[in-house]
Image (cartoon, rainbow, N blue to C red):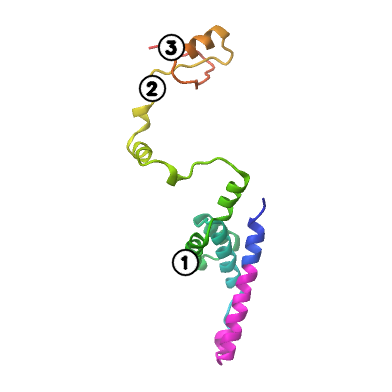
Amino acid sequence: GGTMVPLLTMGSAYGRLCAKIVTLALGAMGQDQAAQNISYATYAVIGAASLQSGASRMTLSIAVLVMETCGALELTIPLMITIFFAKIVGDWTGTGLYDAYIALKGVPYLPEDEISYEQKMVSEKLDVQEIMTSDLVCLPPVPTIGRVVQVLKTCKHSAFPVLEEEREEG
């Protein structure tokens, strides 16, 4: 369910907390001018993107979402770096949030790393025209039972396009 807004909210709170810690540390070191230049909003935006990316393992979509939301194009590079490292740390520490949801709900899916080498080779080297048939069998919107039975008996496949008009054979 709805995890995006809570993750963005917690991430922005974490970012502001980090800004506060940096401000206090700079103040304790006597760098009052540098401490005054710390932007809490910038830290909040970076924190929100970081937590969302680390939890969901999404990268580019989170960067685009956050940049469009805040409208600060000057944060593009810091956002990309932060999101990159958040994803790496997330991948290193465990399963992503949405992958965990898929496993928890028992949804069947085929992860790419479970595809055999031969299947990858076939899918990368063949064009559609090399495996599709040029002998297309179509059905009208309301076919007769006899026509459907005839088509099913004579064809090796079981998917047929439905066309409004009969197409001419040959």
> From the viewer's perspective, is 148 left or right of 9?
left
* Picture residue at 58% right of the left edge, 64% below the top: 51
Where residue 42 sits: x, y (%)? 58, 71
Going by the numbered disc 2, the residue's amino acid type is Thr
- Highlighted magenta segment, given as a residue range: 12-35
Residue identified by numbered label 3: 168
Real-space Cα separation, disc 3 to disc 2, in angstroms: 17 Å
Question: Which of disc 2 and disc 3 is earlier in sequence?
Answer: 2
Q: Residue 117 bears which disc, if any?
A: none
Residue identified by numbered label 1: 81
Q: Is residue 163 above or below residue 32?
A: above
Which mark lies nearer to you, 3 or 2?
A: 2
Asked whether residue 64 is in view, the answer is: yes
Question: Which of disc 2 and disc 1 is earlier in sequence?
Answer: 1
Q: Is residue 20 above or below residue 129?
A: below
Going by the numbered disc 1, the residue's amino acid type is Ile
Going by the numbered disc 3, the residue's amino acid type is Glu
Q: Are marks 1 and 3 in contact (CB under 8 Å)?
A: no
